[in-house]
Image (tube, rainbow, N blue to C red):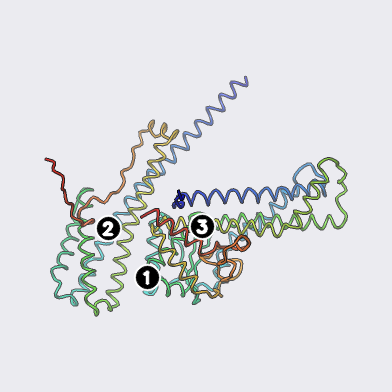
Amino acid sequence: MSQLPPNIYEQQAANKRNTIIVMAIFTAFVGFLGFGVDAFILGSEFPIATFIALCIGAGTAYWGLANGATAILTSASAAPIPPDDPRYQQLRNVVDEMTIASGLPSPRLFVIPDPDPNAFATGKDPGHASIAVTNGLLEKLNREELQAVVAHEMSHVRNYDTRMMTVVAALAGAVMLLSEFGLRATWLGGGKKRDRGGLGPILLVLWIVAMILAPLITQLLSMAVSRQREYLADASGAELTRNPLALAAALQKIDAANEPTRSIKKGTGHLCIADPLGRSVNSKEGALADLFATHPPIDKRIMLLKAMAFQHT
Amino acid sequence: MIVFYGFVILVAVLILWAIGKYNSLVTLRNQVANGWKQIDVQLKRRHDLIPNLVNTVKGYMQFEQETLEKVIKARNAAVSATGVGNIAAKEGELSGALSRLFALAENYPTLKANENVKQLQEELSSTENKISFARQFYNDIATKFNISQQVFPGNLIAGMFGFQAAELFEVKEAAEREVPTVDLSLKK
């Protein structure tokens, strides 16, 4: 009576559902922090602080979205691939194949001079997408595996993951503003409107606890979204190639080359196929390790990909 | 009065929904047509690459003239084929001829080491992949089009404006399967 492992479409549906749940919790958290600032400190009936914090958060995040791609590529010292260099013919072909399979416009291609195998995608929408791979990836993977990695990255583009992570950054920015302001105002003895009675004191305590824990909670929620998008990109990538085992093999090779991808800076990690820092947190399975990682454990990803292959053959 | 306004709003919402549904069906229909054209583009690309390949490998594979001729013949037959069924059959034969050529090429180490041949082989295997991915994309988008025509309430709009279900691409040609069918039934 063992249950069948989830197939490609069920996995995608589950990942999308999980993203929505996490984003709803995140939004509710911002709302609660904002409500506290409005009610306890400003004594306002209207969500002024929430609104301002969200505007500033969205503004900085949008700026990051508009200029982020170039900044990320520059910081990774990624060079555009010359259009007729025979060394990159296979990569160009594989990318063309994936644009055909996905129906997306061709992304710009970059190569990063780094011996560790890794790859990432960026750009604000499919029309402005860039995909960068390291030299190590081109050397270590065979054609099928390279195709699988490109399919994973194209899936990040197709699923608008850069935009998703920008929204996450906007919410995280709003949380930071609200909790900084709220805590300072509380310590400085603001909050004259405390004598409300009823639910007031309980809410106040909850709100102060929420502000103190805000950086931690933000981190946990952002990482949860990031991991769901990784699972989703694995599943959609496998849908493009119809070859989940090739991605599993590629992940195994990337995992085996267990050195950090030095060219890729912290903060870009969530866009990569595997955590560029090579942190042990991503490979250890366990509830606590899971919570703080940008990427799900590679073993678990491989297991899910094998489950998809099982369903398709 | 309230009932009247409620009715007006309801009708407006329904009309807006119908317009949206109609437009999304038209978009999908065009994507399906474009997906079909993509397959043609890739087939044409393969036709253009083959003479190059044959010229390059000719010198190395003198003993395989017959195979090379077969590839050229299959290619020319595919170029001049007309009609969906016929094209599919001829392209299938061409795929078969090419894969036999590649299998034979394994016996020629000097050929395999040649940079030009390597590049051409990469180009051709990529084109083969592109053809199958173009077919896969066509089938994916056609399935999406068909589903959105068939599920309720989209089927009402699809029926009203006479949308037709798109045909899925199937491997019909015998050469692409290359497995003889043995009929052991005692019918007839």
User: Which residue occupies the foreground of this view, B59 or A256?
Assistant: A256
Q: Quadrant of residue A247?
A: bottom left
Residue B14 seen in the figure: yes
User: Mark 3 belongs to which amino acid?
Assistant: Tyr
Judged from the image, the secondary structure of the residue bearing numbered disc 2 is helix
Instruction: Using a 10 Å C-alpha cutoff, classify the residue at mark 2 as few (fewer than 14 neighbours), some (14 to 19) or many (20 or more).
Output: many
**What is the crowding at mark 1: few (fewer than 14 residues within 10 Å), some, or many (at least 20)?**
some
Q: Residue furthest top?
A: B1
Which residue: 38% across, 75% down?
A87
- Expressed as whole percent of the image width and height from the top left, the position of residue B152 reads 44, 34
Q: CA distance from mark 1 to mark 2?
A: 20 Å
**Where does the C terminus of chain A fall, quadrant-wise?**
bottom left
Q: According to the image, label 3 marks what residue? A: A231
Q: Secondary structure at mark 3?
A: helix
Which residue matches tag 1? Answer: A89
Looking at the rendering, which quadrant does residue A173 occupy? bottom right
* Nearest the eye: A20 or A167: A20
Residue drawn at 51 percent across, 61 percent down: A300
> Mark 1: which amino acid?
Gln
Q: Which mark is residue A59?
A: none
Which mark identifies residue B43? 2
x%, y% of residue B54? 20, 70
Q: Residue furthest left?
A: B188
The answer to whether tags 3 and 1 share a subunit is yes
* Disc 3 + disc 2, Cβ < 8 Å: no
Image coordinates of residue A17 in percent, x first then y, are: 55, 48
